[in-house]
Image (cartoon, helix red, strand yellow):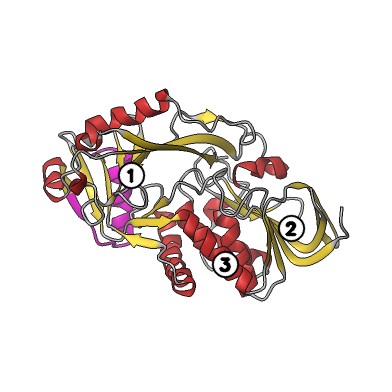
């Protein structure tokens, strides 16, 4: 093991949240090191598979909307600085039966923050967007600011910009352990030892292996699967013809995208089979059972999408019990900050969570309300 190197801040995990955090710290003039056990970007965590939804009509809780306003600003900022197109605005559909959580939650967010929106019944939705085949009694919110992010490109953009500002980032370097004392923190990896004043942990599904406060299912990894199928009528699913969408049936919630990046219509079921997993032992292959579940949904709601399967990918969610994030200081070590438990809906917030984690590491005032994300809330 080499001699110790000292930094202002160490960041463990350089996926979505970590890449933005390293950039925000470097932008503040901090000497920062980002440590990633795999490649940058990689297919092992939660941010691969080309695209992630972003939307203002936030059914999960209206409290997220102010964070989303800032997230959109920061995405456009890093897009401009990097010269990459990262954010595509397509409009967004949130649909379910009228009394369902998707429709009611989206409507509440729109009304609370006076967002621009329109309500469609199943017939009117099909006239505007013929890919949809909603059941009678279902309704949809259309909100024009919805769209998607190119997730792996976002990570690359943040890392490129962080490096240009002097950050140090190591891929293929696994953290073995860390410790904290009155002088700061020490992190041991399979290559070296590092010290710093502050530590930020953004390790995704590996967070509960590095942070004892997240054990006991406070941040539980879960296997997730998405599919790309060949549309029978490609014109229904093309960019400009289909918004991003979230759709709740009687029991589950599904989500999807227009065709972009690779061939096929991409969609998935939120919390797919509800499989708790160890990220180091998870079965990453996609099975016929996975495929059947997703295609049965598409046959009902998107019948013109059900040509041959083109691709499938597995990834990882990291869930809290209440499905809200955790962004907080370690209860025993104030110099350790972490973001975890993004529960399958976190990537759109990468830009703003990276800023918040950097603010915390730099002892700045966080102006946005993140009380919902404290570690000691009763719902987790």
Closer to viewer: mark 3 or mark 2: 3
Q: Pinpoint residue 369: horizontal percent, then vertical percent.
A: 51, 61
126 left or right, relative to 113: left
Q: Pinpoint residue 216: horizontal percent, then vertical percent.
A: 65, 34
Look at 69% across and 43% down and name the residue there.
Answer: 213
Q: Pinpoint residue 256: horizontal percent, then vertical percent.
A: 33, 44
Q: Earlier in the sequence, mark 2 or mark 1?
A: 1
Q: Secondary structure at mark 3?
A: helix
**Quadrant containing the C terminus in the rendered view:** top right
Q: Residues within 10 Å of mark 2 (few under 14, many from 20)?
A: some
Q: Determine contact: label 3, label 1, CB under 8 Å.
A: no
Q: Residue furthest top?
A: 289
Q: Is residue 105 magenta?
A: yes
Identify the residue under disc 1.
Answer: 256
13 left or right, relative to 349: right
Q: Which residues are magenta?
A: 97-119
Question: How far is disc 3 from disc 1 in space, using C-alphas?
Answer: 29 Å
Q: Earlier in the sequence, mark 3 or mark 1?
A: 3
**Which image quarter: residue 309?**
top left
Which numbered tag is attached to residue 167?
none
Q: Is residue 74 magenta?
A: no
Question: How far is disc 2 from disc 1 in space, using C-alphas?
Answer: 40 Å
Identify the residue under disc 2.
Answer: 334
Which numbered tag is attached to residue 160?
3
Closer to viewer: mark 3 or mark 1: 3
Look at 47% across and 44% down and name the residue there.
Answer: 344
90 left or right, relative to 341: left
Q: Residues within 10 Å of mark 3 (few under 14, many from 20)?
A: some
In this orientation, which residue lies closer to the viewer: 222 or 183?
222
């Amino acid at each position: 093991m080499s001699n110790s190197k000292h930094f202002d801040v160490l960041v463990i995990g350089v996926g979505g949240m970590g890449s933005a955090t390293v950039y925000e710290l470097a932008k503040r003039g901090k000497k920062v090191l980002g440590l990633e056990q795999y490649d940058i970007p990689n297919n092992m965590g939660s941010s691969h598979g080309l695209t992630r939804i972003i939307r203002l009509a936030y059914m999960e809780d209206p409290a997220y909307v102010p964070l989303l306003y800032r997230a959109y600003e920061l995405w456009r900022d890093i897009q401009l600085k990097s010269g990459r197109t990262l954010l595509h605005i397509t409009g967004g559909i949130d649909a379910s039966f009228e009394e369902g959580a998707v429709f009611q939650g989206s409507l509440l967010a729109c009304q609370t923050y006076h967002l621009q929106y329109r309500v469609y019944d199943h017939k009117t939705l099909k006239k505007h967007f013929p890919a949809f085949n909603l059941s009678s009694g279902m309704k949809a919110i259309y909100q024009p600011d919805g769209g998607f992010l190119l997730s792996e490109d976002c990570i690359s953009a943040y890392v490129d910009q962080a490096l240009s500002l002097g950050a140090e980032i190591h891929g293929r370097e696994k953290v073995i352990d860390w410790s904290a004392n009155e002088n700061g923190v020490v992190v041991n990896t399979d290559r070296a030892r590092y010290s710093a004043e502050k530590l930020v942990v953004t390790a995704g599904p590996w967070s509960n292996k590095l942070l004892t406060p997240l054990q006991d299912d406070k941040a539980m990894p879960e296997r997730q699967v998405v599919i790309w199928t060949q549309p029978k009528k490609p014109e229904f699913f093309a960019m400009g013809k289909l918004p991003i969408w979230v759709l709740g049936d009687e029991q589950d919630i599904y989500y999807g995208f227009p065709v972009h990046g690779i061939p096929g219509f991409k969609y998935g079921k939120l919390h797919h089979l509800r499989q708790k997993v160890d990220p180091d032992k998870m079965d990453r292959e996609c099975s016929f059972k996975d495929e059947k579940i997703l295609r049965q949904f598409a046959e009902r709601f998107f019948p013109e999408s059900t040509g041959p399967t083109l691709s499938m990918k597995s990834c990882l969610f990291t869930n809290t019990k209440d499905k809200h994030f955790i962004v907080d200081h370690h209860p025993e070590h104030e110099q350790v900050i972490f973001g975890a438990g993004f529960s399958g809906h976190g990537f759109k917030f990468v830009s703003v969570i990276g800023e918040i984690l950097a603010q915390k590491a730099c002892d700045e005032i966080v102006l946005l309300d993140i009380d919902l994300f404290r570690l000691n809330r009763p719902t987790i």
